[in-house]
Image: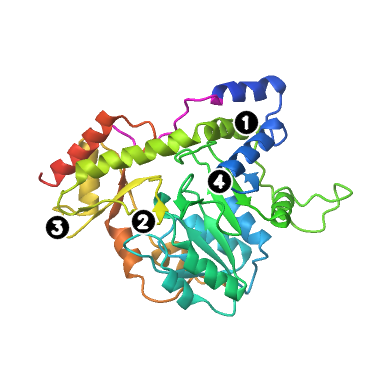
Amino acid sequence: MIPVCEPTLTGKEKEYVDDCLNANWISSGGKYIGLFEQAFADFCGAKYCVSCVNGTAALHLALAAAGVGPGDEVIIPSFAMIAVCNSVIYTGATPVLVDSELDTWNMDPAGVAAAVSDRTRAVITMHTYGHPVDMDPILELAASRGITVIEDSAEAHGAEYKGRRCGSIGAMSAFSFYGNKILTTGEGGAVTTSDPELAERLRSLKNHCFGVPRFVHREIGFNYRMTNIQAAIGLAQVEAAEELVASRRRNAERYNGLLAGVPGVKTPPQASWAKNVYWMYGILLEDDFPLDRGQAMAALRERGVDSRAFFHPMHLQPAYERPMPNRPVVRGPMAAAEELGARGLYLPSSSHLTGEQIEEVAAAVRDIAGQ
């Protein structure tokens, strides 16, 4: 079975972890926290990086640092990973859902503009599967209304929008380093920013808001610290980041060539103003594909190819059907989100996939398509 995604650990990960163990620094203290944070900030083109336990915590930290709370609204895409919506709910604010674009798979800037209200405090722009959101219209709107823009860059390590790396565009950017991400620490996350006041606030909030004296807390914070061992793995990953990103792009080029002309298969987006990193190589199965998505995934598995369905839109999630004070609000039709959620799947996408494996996957897709 060719798995959907595995971590690529071919650098100094073991060496750095052994150093942590030998030095007895295995918790949230130790030199690798600072080394990893600085290296990742430099990679993103941001001034500061604040590490934390996972990508969901990173989103929650960014929203808390922005002052988002009960009574506020935060605009997010309905076609998203559920962590985006949940992180807003954790703050007591209300998620406002907007539709996506079929040509980028990302939130529609026009939908964002239509969803803004007097209660809008922030917008989370999720760079879906590694393709950047069209940020300029959203940034211009946000600047005119005093709205904070937070990038969800969990899937976009190394992606670029008009020459700028994701992680350096919004006021803050949240990252995940889960095991299937291009750069991984096993579990883990981070928030990048170039605002020194936000960086200081993020560091305080992630660590219980310890004060002076140390055990006098004037605010309620969180225990969202990353461990030195995770940061050691992360540093080794950042050292290999350019090659890991380049591998994802090379793999996508191979897939694109091998799947070109297969009826009913739509390959991933690549806008002229963006550099997709293809965190996951996704395809859409259109009307002329002979199988529905469930049948296609089962047929691929029979041929030794693992796959995953696209995200299930937030406005269709059973978890949000029950009464709740800040239940997600839908602003406008969600046709694109529903189509993406129903038709999309992603194929094996590990950075270390071989050419032979990609050919095997593409051959399986062509086979079930009747080619």
Q: Identity of the amino acid at label 4?
A: Cys
Q: Which residue is mark 3?
A: 288
Q: Which residues are magenta?
A: 1-13
Q: Which residue is mark 1?
A: 229
Q: Which residue is mark 4?
A: 44
Left or right, 342 with reference to 17: left
Q: Identity of the amino acid at label 2?
A: Ser
Query: Looking at the picture, how far across and down is residue 24, in whole percent?
Result: 71, 24
Residue at coordinates 50% horizontally, 38% vertically from top-left? 183
Mark 1 to mark 2: distance in Å? Answer: 39 Å
Mark 4 to mark 2: distance in Å? Answer: 20 Å
Q: Identity of the amino acid at label 3?
A: Asp
In the rendered image, the residue lying farthest to the left is 370
| Residue 207 highlighted magenta (yes or no) | no
Label 1 Cα crowd, 10 Å radius (few <14 / some 14-19 / many 20+): many
Of callouts 1 and 2, the N-terminal one = 1
The quarter holding residue 218 reads bottom right
Task: Note whether 169 is above or below 304 in the view shown.
Answer: below
Of callouts 3 and 1, the N-terminal one = 1
Left or right, 247 with reference to 164: left
Left or right, 175 with reference to 313: right
Image quarter hosting the C terminus: top left
Q: Are marks 3 and 1 in contact (CB under 8 Å)?
A: no
Q: Are marks 1 and 4 in contact (CB under 8 Å)?
A: no
- Asked which secondary structure carries label 4, the reply is helix
Q: Identity of the amino acid at label 1?
A: Ile
Of callouts 4 and 3, the N-terminal one = 4
- Asked which secondary structure carries label 3, the reply is loop
Query: Looking at the picture, how far across and down is residue 45, in whole percent?
Result: 58, 47
Tally the marks: 4
